[in-house]
């Protein structure tokens, strides 16, 4: 049998990268000798995160359309042409049996080049409101794996498979590792812990709200693991320095998210699809602060899918400065509410999403196990 060859593409944010890596890992588990290649956007975080996960990646010079009229938008048609030419060459050289797109700029040119060459394409849409790249590509895709019901308003119904979002494998049963996690983050077992994650790139409103509320957290005997992203890290470091020995830790990026979740009693998070899926799979009592700066406000829709079922609390971005820290203090003090949120969010989890999608990839590639 011919070796299995798969190209995956998706990036720009962790929300597109981590599902792609989870799918790749599952393909490798099923077919250890599979030849897997990633295609990403030059200068974006996938060019660093994918090699760190152990996979080869080729960058293409694609960028997104800026909402404001800028010089960058004038360059976009040229970048698209260059990216289409480069992805066409990648397809020709690598000769995959199937390609997978998880959203983001780079997946557009790659999947277009693939379907134009008669190669089957699988799309994985993480959000409850489909991204523009996936909407355009859906007409030519062979299969579309989604995480929410009702996606036929965006995609052809006969191509849709409800799978949920793939999450990182190390997040299974994280709560068993609480003691290890507390030691890793140098936290006290006698105090409650809030984990703050603003997404892989950080979140301005969440960061400013937490920074302004540090004294209140200390006054309530609460510890903090705070992923700030690159932009706010220096400021956050200076802010937590004032609370030496109070177990308040600011980190630019958390490499051991499994231990961060294990240590936490509650989580404050943006409502990106991957984050929401992780919180569902772990069963974390959560406060979601949807980013207003995303296409079609899809994070609010993701958050409402949980909050309307009493599976998470929702704080609007423009209200965060005034209510976020107080909402967190109230939740971490209310064990009964935490149990209710945990029970409800756990019921919204999909099991083995990465495995289900990987099996679909093999099917499209006509590869028998």
Image (cartoon, rainbow, N blue to C red):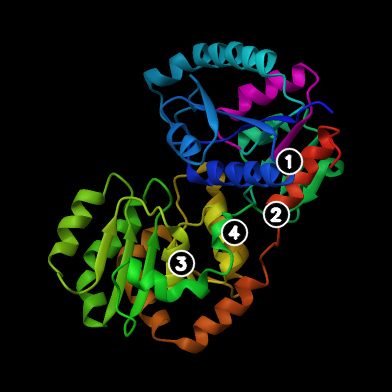
Residue 355 among magenta residues: no
Labelled disc at residue 353: 2
In the figure, 27 relative to 315: above or below? above
Which type of secondary structure does the marked residue at label 2 adopt?
Answer: helix
Q: CA distance from mark 4 to mark 2?
A: 10 Å
Residue at x-position 58% and y-position 13%: 86
Q: Residue 140 location in percent, x, y?
A: 78, 27
Position of the N terminus, as image quadrant, is top right
The numbered mark, 2 or 1, whose residue comes first in the sequence reads 1
Residue 332 falls in which quadrant of the image?
Answer: bottom left
Residue identifier under label 4: 277
- Total numbered badges shown on the rendered structure: 4
Classify residue 248 as left or right of residue 161.
left
Residue sitting at x 50%, y 37%? 50
- Give the magenta-colored segment's residue range: 103-123
Q: Nearer the viewer, residue 172 or 63?
A: 172
Earlier sequence position, callout 3 versus callout 1: 1
Left or right relative to 267: residue 360: right
Camera-side mark, 3 or 1: 1
State the CA–CA distance, disc 3 to disc 4: 13 Å
Q: Secondary structure at mark 4?
A: helix
Crowd band around label 2 with a 10 angstrom C-alpha radius: few (<14), some (14–19), many (20+): many
Q: Label 4, label 1: how many angstroms apart (C-alpha)?
A: 25 Å
Q: Earlier in the sequence, mark 4 or mark 1?
A: 1
The quarter of the picture where residue 327 lies is bottom left
Q: Which mark is drawn over residue 261? A: 3
Disc 1 crowd rating (10 Å Cα; few below 14, some 14-19, many 20+) is some
First-in-chain label (3 vs 4):
3
Which of the pair 257/319 is nearer the observer? 257
Which quadrant does the C terminus fall into? top right
Mark 1 highlights which residue?
31
């Amino acid at each position: 049998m011919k070796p299995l060859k798969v190209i995956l593409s998706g990036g720009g944010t962790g929300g597109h990268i981590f599902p792609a890596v989870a799918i790749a890992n599952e393909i490798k588990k099923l077919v250890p000798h599979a030849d897997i290649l990633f295609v990403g956007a030059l200068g974006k975080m996938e060019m660093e995160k994918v090699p760190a996960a152990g996979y080869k990646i080729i960058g293409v010079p694609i960028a997104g359309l800026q909402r404001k009229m800028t010089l960058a938008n004038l360059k976009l048609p040229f970048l698209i042409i260059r990216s289409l030419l480069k992805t066409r060459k990648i397809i020709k050289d690598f000769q995959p049996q199937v390609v997978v797109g998880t959203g983001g700029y780079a997946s557009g040119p790659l999947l277009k080049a693939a379907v134009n060459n008669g190669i089957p394409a699988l799309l994985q849409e993480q959000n409850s409101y489909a991204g523009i790249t996936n909407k355009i590509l859906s007409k030519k895709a062979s299969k579309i794996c989604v995480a929410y019901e009702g996606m036929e308003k965006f995609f052809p119904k006969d191509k849709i498979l409800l799978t949920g979002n793939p999450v990182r494998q190390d997040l299974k049963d994280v709560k068993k590792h609480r003691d290890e996690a507390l030691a890793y983050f140098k936290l006290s077992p006698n105090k409650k812990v809030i984990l703050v994650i603003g997404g892989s790139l950080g979140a301005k409103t969440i960061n400013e709200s937490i920074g302004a509320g540090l004294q209140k957290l200390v006054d309530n005997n609460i510890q903090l693991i705070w992923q700030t992203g690159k932009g706010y890290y220096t400021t956050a470091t200076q802010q937590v320095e004032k609370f030496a020995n109070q177990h308040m830790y600011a980190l630019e990026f958390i490499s051991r998210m499994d231990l961060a979740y294990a240590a936490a009693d509650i989580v404050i998070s943006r409502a990106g699809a991957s984050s929401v899926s992780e919180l569902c799979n772990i069963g974390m009592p959560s406060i979601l602060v949807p980013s207003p700066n995303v296409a079609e406000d899809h994070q609010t829709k993701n958050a409402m899918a949980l909050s309307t079922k009493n599976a998470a609390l929702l704080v609007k971005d423009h209200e965060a400065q005034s209510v976020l820290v107080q909402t967190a203090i109230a939740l971490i003090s209310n064990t009964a509410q935490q149990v209710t949120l945990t029970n409800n969010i756990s019921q919204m989890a999909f099991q083995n999403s990465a495995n289900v999608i990987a099996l679909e990839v093999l099917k499209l590639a006509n590869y028998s196990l």
